[in-house]
């Protein structure tokens, strides 16, 4: 459940969140697993659309490291990486995942587990569970108009309540 | 508010569940939204919050607990009054974070899907070639 915590001053605000995402892929799980552990394949799909991965290395062994540099079309680079904690082909993969912004600030410290289950018709049900500590102050610094955005939301909230 | 509800709908569409469900569940209740709107004007005690709602103190306390667990409000340490205040950043950060993080994975998975279909086609082609060679 939500474990949102706010600690200390505004400058050190942190949050820890858990997200579970599921997706069915139309291929057997051995293939999906390989796409996560073979650097050549990982490089082709990791990251949001319009991102490329000029650096993509993964040493898929327990204790091995992975390291990816994502490049946005603007040229901004977002390095991320971590250490593999559990590898059970073709069932499960668990690793730490850290991300830094283009200025080198750590913005996410996370732990991710990926489960690959057989799904009817030779398909794969992938369940990704990721817990992340987010250093949102740094992350939000990149987002312009934060305060403006928030007060607008509050205005809408107030208007909505007033309309009842 | 509208933005957040819309974001939630989109997240549901991606068949995604997460801890923020607690935040959205907290926001789904009109009394709790009214409490938040009241707190937008400044901090208030439980008694002050209970007044406009014709609700018992325990009922208001229950709503406050939900809001507190969802990170939407914080409560003072004063044992007797424990004034409540809005955690403005929590809601905004939550939606920004969710936006970033869910987009990262769903877009990655879109690309993974395309990649795997391509791999499957290649395998089938190879299989066909072998078959024809026989």
Image (cartoon, coloured by chain):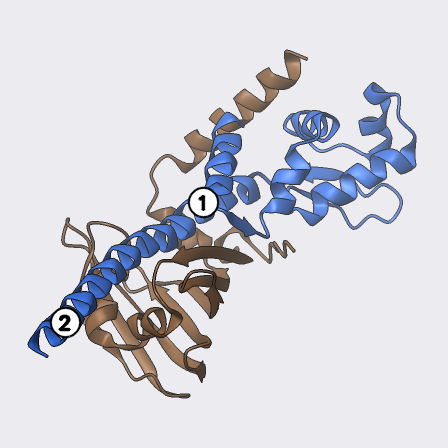
Mark 2 belongs to chain: B
Q: Is residue B100 left or right of residue B33?
A: left
Q: Quadrant of the N terminus of chain A?
A: bottom right
Q: Nearer the viewer, mark 1 or mark 2?
A: 2
Q: Quadrant of the C terminus of chain A?
A: top right
Q: Is residue A44 left or right of residue A100?
A: left
Q: Is residue A103 left or right of residue B19?
A: left
- Chain identifier, colour brown: A
Q: Which residue, as the protein is rendered here, is positioned at the far front?
A: B134
Q: Position of residue B74 (x, y in %)?
A: 69, 45
- Chain identifier, colour blue: B
Q: Nearer the viewer, residue A86 or A54?
A: A86
Q: Quadrant of residue B29?
A: top right
Under circle 2, the secondary element is: helix
Task: Tell me the tag on residue B126.
Answer: 2
Structural crowding at the residue carrying mark 2, measured as other residues with C-alpha within 10 Å and reported as few (<14), some (14–19) or many (≥20): few
Badge 1 and badge 2 both on one subunit: yes
């Amino acid at each position: 459940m939500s474990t949102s915590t706010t600690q200390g001053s505004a400058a050190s605000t942190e949050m820890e969140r858990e997200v579970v995402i599921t997706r069915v892929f139309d291929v057997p799980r051995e293939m999906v697993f390989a796409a996560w552990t073979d650097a050549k394949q990982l490089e082709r799909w990791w990251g949001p659309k319009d991102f490329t991965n000029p650096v993509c290395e993964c040493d898929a062994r327990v204790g091995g490291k992975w390291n990816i540099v994502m490049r946005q079309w603007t040229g901004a680079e977002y390095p991320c990486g971590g250490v593999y904690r559990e590898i059970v082909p073709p069932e499960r993969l668990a690793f730490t995942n850290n991300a830094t912004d283009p200025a080198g600030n750590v913005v996410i410290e996370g732990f991710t587990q990926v489960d690959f289950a057989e799904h009817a018709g030779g398909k794969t049900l992938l369940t990704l569970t990721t817990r992340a500590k987010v250093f949102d102050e740094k992350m939000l610094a990149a987002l312009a108009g934060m305060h403006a955005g928030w007060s607008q939301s509050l205005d809408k909230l107030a208007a909505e309540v007033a309309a009842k | 508010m509208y933005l957040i509800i819309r974001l939630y709908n989109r997240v549901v569409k991606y068949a995604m569940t997460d801890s923020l469900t607690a935040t959205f569940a907290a926001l789904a209740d009109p009394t709790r939204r009214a409490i938040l709107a009241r707190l937008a004007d400044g901090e208030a005690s439980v008694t002050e919050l209970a007044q406009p709602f014709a609700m018992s103190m325990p009922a208001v306390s229950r709503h406050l607990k939900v809001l507190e667990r969802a990170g939407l409000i914080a409560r003072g340490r004063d044992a007797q009054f424990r004034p409540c205040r809005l955690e403005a950043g929590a809601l905004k950060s939550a939606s920004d974070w969710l936006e970033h993080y869910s987009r990262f994975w769903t877009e990655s998975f879109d690309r993974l899907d395309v990649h795997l279909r391509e791999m499957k086609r290649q395998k089938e082609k190879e299989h066909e070639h072998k078959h024809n060679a026989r």
